[in-house]
């Protein structure tokens, strides 16, 4: 009996010794003493809530335990991918954040349903298997390291592997004596259901030939997994540190929390008279309002809504401006017009009726999306049904349009990238009063175009948060963040990113649709938060135009 008692006492002694050593190594007695001393000093009303907060600060930093990829539907009702990050927090697995970015095949976003389904399936497989394994145990606060794993350790390997497969397939399909075929131009542009005024004319060899289209940058199926995981990890890092995403992004870019922030001026789409609009005109994909500096976001939205009401009143009552209108994917009215002057005349009249000074309180930008208008069978741009223009003729048309409407201070993608000579010519004739902008979302590695002062950048595909920071740092003061038509339905991270990157302008689309208004509302919320904290920089320090010559020279 005594031997058994002795053994039990020995076991208890060993257990006590082990416990004491465990507590000593983890500094439990010291932390308990400090916690109780501080508790007594503060004497809070919620005693255990105070202790919970105290010990929560001593918890181990969260580590990524799992990624989860799932299929969701975007603003167009099309399949997309969403990435979710789970971490171990206080010894329990917890869902931290999720994110989705647009999955595009190029400027026209022309993925077939089967291709899109395969793309999303591949993205989900990447997230749930290889990326899940590669990021397990990583700190969500090490954004640069995470993005390097995503972009270079994983994606680049897949990209090169896919490239080798494609090259081998080309070699097998091509006979030894047959030269390699390099695609030089896309299929002829689909025109609106009208006759061309050139029909019946014979082409002449003396007519200047347009440069062939540049081969599109390859888009690897599943690549949207990279951008989605990167953004989800950034949101998790911000949540872990207990700061808003815009502050987290700003600290990543600047190395520290900046003393002040400013709100990017929102560029709001008023009308669409592009290729999918009901009228003959195809040239003006978007007519965009640029508000004057110094206005709050809420004031800008109120002013724009009043202007839109006046535009609708004029269209409904005037025979001059009467036009068919439908709601487009970008949340604006797609209006049936025949000439580019007509929507600008409508806005001019509406500004007068609403008591707004066009050219002072309001300026305009035109997104031309000209690359979608080239008819390669004729070597001309079809700016409207039956109206074809050579690149030089298009330059002349822009010069006349801007001269007649001086409130137009920016043209976005007025020409194809291949028409470099005309870009330079256009810059020479209108560059003093009107800036040229280029969308680099699909040509991020392409050489700069002559005369371009600013760039449109979208968060799509394999673009990581670190990529956005790098691009905006190199091209400081000359980048506009833009949304796509196929945006995630409930994401407001876009506004945080634009503020955190310190951009002067952000392009969010029209004032309708939950996916767009969520972003506008978030911008308002951030502005109010910064104002309450006294760290909102004055808008007068960041006025239009888009963009100054000085900003371009800094790139």
Image (cartoon, grey):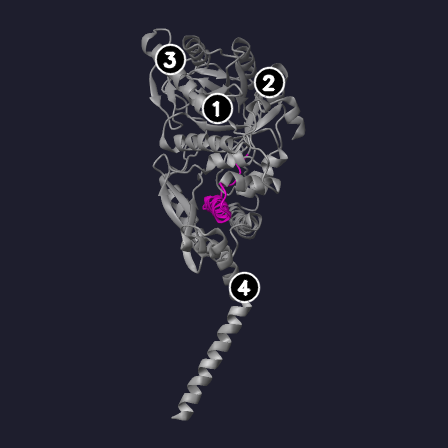
Q: Nearer the viewer, mark 4 or mark 1?
A: 4
Q: Is 277 situated above or below 172?
A: above
- Mark 4 Cα-neighbour bin, 10 Å: few <14, some 14–19, many ≥20: few
Measured from the top left, where is residue 353 in percent x and y? 41, 8
Measured from the top left, where is residue 148 in percent x and y? 57, 49
Q: Nearer the viewer, mark 4 or mark 3?
A: 4
Q: Which one is earlier in the sequence, the residue at label 1 or at label 3?
A: 1
Q: Nearer the viewer, residue 90 or 192?
A: 90
The magenta span reads 215-244
Measured from the top left, where is residue 129 in percent x and y? 44, 56
Q: Which one is earlier in the sequence, the residue at label 4 or at label 3?
A: 4
Q: CA distance from mark 1 to mark 2?
A: 34 Å
* Number of marks present in the image shown: 4
Q: Predominant secondary structure in magenta?
A: helix
Q: Which one is earlier in the sequence, the residue at label 2 or at label 3?
A: 3
Q: Is 337 situated above or below 77?
A: above
Q: Nearer the viewer, residue 297 or 198?
A: 297
Q: Residue 296, which numbered label?
A: 1
Q: CA distance from mark 2 to mark 3?
A: 33 Å
Q: Which residue has dot 2 on it? A: 426
User: Image quadrant for the N terminus?
Assistant: bottom left
Q: Which residue has dot 4 on it? A: 30
Q: Residue 493, which numbered label?
A: none
Q: Which residue has dot 3 on it? A: 310
Q: CA distance from mark 2 to mark 4?
A: 72 Å
Q: CA distance from mark 4 to mark 3?
A: 70 Å
- Mark 1 Cα-neighbour bin, 10 Å: few <14, some 14–19, many ≥20: some
Q: Which one is earlier in the sequence, the residue at label 4 or at label 1?
A: 4
Q: Please identify the residue farthest to the top as the structure is shown.
A: 319
């Amino acid at each position: 009996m005594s031997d058994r008692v002795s053994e039990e006492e020995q076991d208890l002694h060993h257990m006590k010794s082990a416990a004491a050593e465990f507590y000593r190594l983890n500094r439990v007695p010291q932390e308990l003493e400090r916690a109780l001393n501080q508790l007594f000093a503060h004497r809070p009303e919620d005693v255990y809530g105070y202790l919970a907060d105290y010990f929560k600060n001593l918890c181990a930093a969260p580590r990524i335990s799992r990624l989860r990829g799932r299929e969701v539907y975007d603003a167009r009702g099309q399949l997309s991918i969403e990435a979710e990050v789970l971490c171990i927090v206080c010894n329990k697995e917890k869902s931290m954040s999720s994110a989705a970015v647009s999955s595009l095949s190029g400027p026209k976003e022309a993925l077939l349903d089967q291709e899109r389904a395969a793309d999303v399936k591949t993205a989900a497989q990447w997230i749930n298997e290889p990326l899940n394994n590669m990021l397990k145990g990583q700190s969500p606060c090490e954004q640069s390291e995470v993005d390097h794993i995503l972009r270079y350790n994983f994606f680049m390997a897949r990209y090169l592997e896919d490239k080798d497969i494609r090259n081998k397939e080309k070699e097998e399909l091509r006979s030894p004596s047959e030269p390699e075929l390099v695609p030089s131009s896309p299929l002829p542009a689909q025109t609106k259901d009208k006759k061309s005024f050139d029909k019946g004319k014979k082409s002449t060899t003396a007519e200047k030939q347009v440069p062939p289209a540049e081969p599109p940058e390859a888009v690897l199926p599943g690549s949207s997994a990279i951008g989605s995981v990167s953004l989800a990890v950034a949101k998790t890092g911000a949540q872990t540190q207990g700061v808003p995403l815009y502050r987290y992004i700003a600290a990543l870019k600047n190395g520290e929390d900046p003393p002040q922030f400013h709100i990017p001026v929102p560029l709001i789409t008023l009308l669409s008279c592009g290729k999918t609009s009901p009228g003959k005109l195809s040239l003006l994909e978007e007519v965009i309002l640029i508000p004057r500096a110094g206005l709050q976001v809420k004031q800008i939205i109120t002013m724009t809504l009043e202007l839109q009401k006046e535009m609708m009143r004029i269209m409904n009552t005037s025979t001059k401006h009467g036009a068919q209108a439908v709601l487009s994917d970008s949340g604006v009215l797609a209006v049936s017009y025949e000439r580019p002057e007509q929507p600008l005349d409508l806005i001019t009249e509406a500004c007068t009726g609403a008591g707004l000074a066009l050219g002072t309180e309001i300026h305009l930008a035109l997104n031309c999306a000209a690359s979608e208008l080239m008819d390669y069978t004729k070597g001309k741009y079809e700016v409207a049904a039956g109206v074809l223009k050579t690149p030089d003729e298009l330059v002349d048309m822009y010069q006349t349009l801007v001269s007649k409407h001086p409130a137009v201070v920016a043209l976005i993608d007025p020409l194809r990238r291949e028409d470099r000579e005309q870009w330079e010519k256009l810059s020479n004739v209108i560059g003093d009063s009107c800036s040229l902008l280029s969308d680099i979302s699909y040509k991020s590695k392409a050489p700069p175009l002559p005369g371009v002062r600013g760039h449109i950048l979208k968060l799509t595909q394999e673009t990581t948060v670190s990529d956005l920071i790098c691009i905006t740092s190199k091209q400081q003061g000359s980048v506009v963040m833009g949304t796509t038509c196929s945006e995630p339905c409930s994401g407001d991270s876009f506004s945080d990113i634009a503020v955190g990157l310190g951009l002067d302008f952000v392009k969010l689309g029209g004032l309708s649709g939950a996916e767009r208004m969520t972003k506008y509302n978030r911008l308002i919320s951030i502005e109010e938060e910064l104002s309450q904290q006294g760290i909102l920089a004055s808008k007068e320090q960041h006025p239009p135009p888009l963009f100054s010559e000085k900003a371009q020279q800094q790139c």
